[in-house]
Amino acid sequence: MAFDPHKTFYLETFGCQMNVHDSEKVIGTLISEGYRQVPTVDEASLILYNTCSIRDKAEQKVFHRLADYKKLQAQGKKFGVLGCVAQQEGERIFERAPHVSMVCGSASYRNLPEMLVQIEAGNRRVTGLDDRQTDACFETEFTARTNPHRGYITIIEGCDKFCAYCVVPFTRGKERSRSSESVLAEAVRMAAAGYTEIQLLGQNVNSYKDPQGKKTFAELLAAVAEVPGIKRVRFTTSHPRDFGRDIVYAIESVPTLCDHVHLPVQSGSTRVLDAMQRLYTREQYLERIQWMKEARREISITTDVIVGFPGETEGDFQETLSLLEEVEYDSVFGFKYSPRPNTPSLRLRDAVPDEEKARRLAVLLEKQREIQRCRNQRHLGQRAEVMVEGKNEARGQWIGRTSQNKVLNFKAPDGVAPGLGSYVPVVTTAIFPNSLFGEMVI
Ligand code: SAH
Ligand code: SF4
Ligand code: F3S
């Protein structure tokens, strides 16, 4: 398509890695349609906002931001809302923010080229909201990846689990997987383009079902990790219910498969897990942890926890704390339960007051800080390979990441400047709750 200097866009992205990667696909698609990405709202003719709806009155924040943008309409700029709030609020967005002319959920990005034509033709209400029940994934050859060394591949979209608190099944639609063939072909293309790290994505990445029936999830992991040129493969997020022992075997036997699993538990109380409709008990979850602890290769384990789900008692919360002690996670993301539109838990009684949620969250995070302080000790004096991700010029330190997904900042010997994206050995000499520090060895 011919390049048009007036077709410029600014895109801002919120939310999970899948949203970040969707934005890379959206950017690639817009560029292939003759648009140019610009770094500021001022320079843009089209302003896009890729939104997240997971917590904390997300839709209100989006409406506030859109209200801020309203004054720019006089300059002839056009506005589009993408992502989870777009899907959730749908045409209501046009009512509350009449300067918006496009509302598009993630299942409809395939239709963006047609939608752009409609916007250019002056259509004031262009929507992409009806594709949530589709079997198709948003595959595009135009993905504009932002990092030249490390890239995402979405292997499964949507979610069919319907946990009681969660908007994702409503915003991202039904679960659908890409064929292992197309995933592998993309991995091979990425390796040829110089990528060495691939992160496979899905809301529940391990619920993956090859539509052609050729590979299980664990087999796909191993196959991507064995693509020549690929040095690291990560995958996120795993759902405990679908977490099979074959994933642990794959990590044990394929060194390029990273030794890190993010396995959100949400609560340590089976009673709360049941109310959350999480489809597993505390014991079943701990069994999966045990598989990982018994692995021949040490696996770093991280999790998500929600505190203050309706009806969560002090006793339930204590069970979550005891689970933290039992598992000894490498890192925990804690959230206060937040009531979300459309979700079944809105109807539950016995809400936990906000101050109590805040107290539980603080206790949880403090407990985890202690655990990490002790647990990180094991890295002291150990050598690990890091991928160099950047440099902190002020401190003269390099920023690295280990296979276990830990940030390991380091000093290089005088006169040595490791290249971004290169892999170098580092010995850890100091530990902090959320990162490690070390010296590069040559
Ligand atoms: N599919 C993943 C999680 C996706 S959402 C899984 O099932 O594990 C990311 C995290 O956001 C969740 O693990 C959960 O801890 C948190 N979260 C989701 N909905 C929430 C809500 N309504 N309130 C608070 N936290 C929530
Ligand atoms: Fe949400 Fe549950 Fe699906 Fe995860 S599994 S995305 S928490 S509904
Ligand atoms: Fe947010 Fe949607 Fe991801 S709600 S967390 S952007 S799936």
Image: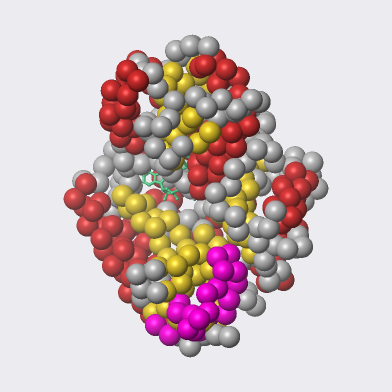
Residue 294 on image: x %, y %: 60, 75
Colouring method of the image: secondary structure
Residue 383 on image: x %, y %: 55, 83
Q: Is residue 55 magenta?
A: no
Q: Is residue 397 above or below residue 355?
A: below
Q: Nearer the viewer, residue 234 or 241?
A: 234
Q: Is residue 166 above or below residue 433?
A: above
Q: Nearer the viewer, residue 328 or 100?
A: 100
Identify which residue is drawn at 50% across, 36% down. Answer: 37
The part of the image, by quadrant, that contains residue 392 is bottom left
Quarter of the figure that contains the N terminus: top right
Describe residue 139's horizontal placement relative to residue 300 as left or right: right
- Which residue sits furthest front? 5
Quarter of the figure that contains the C terminus: bottom right
Identify which residue is drawn at 60% across, 55% down. Answer: 148
The part of the image, by quadrant, that contains residue 47 is top left
Q: Is residue 423 magenta?
A: yes
Q: Is residue 123 visible?
A: yes
The part of the image, by quadrant, that contains residue 97 is top left
Q: How many marks?
A: 0
- Which residue sits furthest bottom? 381
Q: Is residue 126 above or below residue 141?
A: above
Identify which residue is drawn at 41% across, 32% down. Answer: 43
Residue 401 on image: x %, y %: 51, 68
Looking at the rendering, the stretch of residues picked out in magenta corresponds to 409-430
Q: Is residue 241 visible?
A: no
Residue 262 on image: x %, y %: 52, 59
Identify which residue is drawn at 25% across, 60% down. Answer: 362
Describe residue 165's horizontal placement relative to residue 137 as left or right: left
Describe residue 380's horizontal placement relative to residue 318 as left or right: right
